[in-house]
Image (cartoon, rainbow, N blue to C red):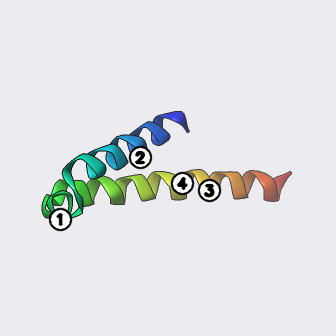
């Protein structure tokens, strides 16, 4: 989870440094956000499955 938090922190930092318009102009940044959202969804689903089984 710290690994994913580090990725998200790096993207937020880059967004702050570049500004929204320049940041969104780079398609790779959008792909990074999709990847981060999938990481978060995986974590949430694993926690939900663990809670449901317990």
Q: Earlier in the sequence, mark 3 or mark 1?
A: 1
Q: Which residue is mark 4?
A: 42
At x 62%, y 56%, the residue is 44
Q: Say if mark 1 contacts mark 2, CB within 8 Å.
A: no
Q: Is residue 4 above or below residue 15?
A: above
| Front one among 23 and 35 | 23
Of callouts 4 and 2, which one flags the residue occurring earlier in the amino acid sequence? 2
Q: Residue furthest right?
A: 54
What is the spatial separation of the Cα atoms under label 1 and label 2, in whole angstroms?
18 Å
Viewer-nearest of discs 4 and 2: 2
- Horizontally, is 7 left or right of 29 in the view? right
Residue 41 spot, x, y in % from top left? 53, 59
CA gap, disc 1 and disc 4: 29 Å
The residue drawn where x is 69% and y is 52% is 47
* Residue at the disc numbered 3: 44
Residue 8 badge: 2
Image quadrant where residue 35 sits: bottom left
What separation in Å lies between label 4 and label 2 (alpha carbons)? 15 Å
């Amino acid at each position: 989870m710290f690994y994913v938090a580090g990725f998200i922190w790096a993207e937020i930092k880059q967004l702050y440094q570049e500004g929204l318009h320049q940041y969104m102009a780079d398609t790779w940044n959008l792909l990074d956000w999709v990847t981060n959202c999938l990481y978060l969804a995986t974590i949430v689903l694993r926690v939900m499955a663990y809670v449901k089984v317990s």
